[in-house]
Image (cartoon, grey):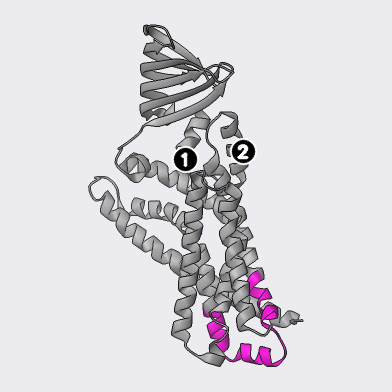
Amino acid sequence: MIGTTLARYLSMRFFNTIMMVFLTICGTVYVVDFVEMLRRASNHPGVTPLFVAFLSFLRTPSVAEQVLPFCVLFGTMTAFIDLTRRLELIVARAAGVSVWQFLLPPVGIALFIGIASIAVLNPVSAQMKQRADLIEDRLFGHNGQSQGDTSLWVRQTSIDGQAFLHGDESSDGGTKLIGVNGYLYDPKGTFDLKVKAREGQLIDGVWRLKNVLVTAPGQDAMRVGTFLVASNVTPEHLAETFLAPESIPFWALPRARQETDAAGLDSTGFSLQYQTLLARPLLLIAMVLIAAAFSLRFFRFGGIGRMVGGGLIAGFVLYLLTKMVADLGSSGLLSVSVAAWSPAIVGSMLGCLALLQREDG
């Protein structure tokens, strides 16, 4: 088995290289985002470069989470190349250390980084992203863009049955709706009423609709001044619907999912984000295995440029697969567990298969 001294040495080499790549990419992201935010804020008098620099600082950690798999991939390949050029891996192989033995340190480092990113980096980046989104909303409009479409769908389940409400415009975190259309069902699931109101507001467990046209099956339409729709949706639930799942810390995702389900709202995004974060350590391990499959043959076969390019392409394909499967999961075409875990599992299996084919073990 690989010795303790060698394992500690390799672990520090891989950790330092991955962190160097991570900090370099984060610095680049920060500079690019700072320049872009300066351009966007140029038409807003009173916004100083120092304030824009602070806003870019709040936005950078969330982007860093997205590029973390690539940092592990680049860092692992760089470490393997450096160890090969220094002939250290050749000496280890000559001493009888197999590829699976000196893969243990980078795999352990990837596992450590994955767990640390879930427990520490994600909560910090989520809180910073929430604050950045609030600042962008105040400066540039909703989500940093123009106001645009502020319509909102609300699906709820209360003591009176299910109700589907749609507002052409929403404000105050979704508690005020303009141009409301509602479809009400009794507790047995039978369609009961259709309501069309000029405006509506969520207060004390009910939606208070004003200037309402009520239509029931088989009856003439009737206009009323005020119509109340019972609701178990709270302002906090509606506020969370305006937050991207990436803006909610890992430790708060189970609570947000449970409360959203209890309110009858769609919690798929929260469930998918939670499972994706749980699968992150395995995804980072997959990146290590892919990097090893494309970098451990340098000292025997040469072709560094071609092999590095192949590794980068393989990692990029795996990242795209992760995003594509996540989109399928968020749309309901795949289960949340399959969408979150399948890319990491498939990537790990392919990395192991490539190593089995190319190495003697």
Element carrying mark 2 = helix
Range covered by the magenta-colored residues: 78-107
Q: Residues within 10 Å of mark 1 (few under 14, many from 20)?
A: some
Q: Residues within 10 Å of mark 2 (few under 14, many from 20)?
A: few
Residue labelled with disc 2: 255
Residue labelled with disc 1: 243
Name the kind of residue labelled 1 in the image: Leu
Name the residue at 53% across, 84% down. Answer: 81
Give the quadrant of the C terminus.
Answer: bottom right
Q: Is residue 174 visible?
A: yes
Q: Is residue 347 above or below residue 58?
A: below
Of labels 2 and 1, earlier in sequence is 1
Q: Is residue 129 magenta?
A: no
Q: Is residue 102 above or below residue 162?
A: below
Pinpoint residue 39: horizontal percent, then vertical percent: 26, 54
Q: Is residue 233 visible?
A: no
Which residue ends up furthest to the right in the rendered image?
Answer: 1
Q: Is residue 186 above or below residue 127?
A: above
Name the residue at 37% across, 28% down. Answer: 170
* Front residue (pair 120, 98): 98
Question: Is label 2 in contact with label 1 (beta carbons under 8 Å)?
Answer: no
Name the kind of residue labelled 2 in the image: Arg
Element carrying mark 1 = loop
Q: Which label is found at residue 325? A: none
Give the quadrant of the N terminus.
Answer: bottom right
Pinpoint residue 57: horizontal percent, then vertical percent: 42, 55
Left or right of residue 33, residue 17 in this image: right
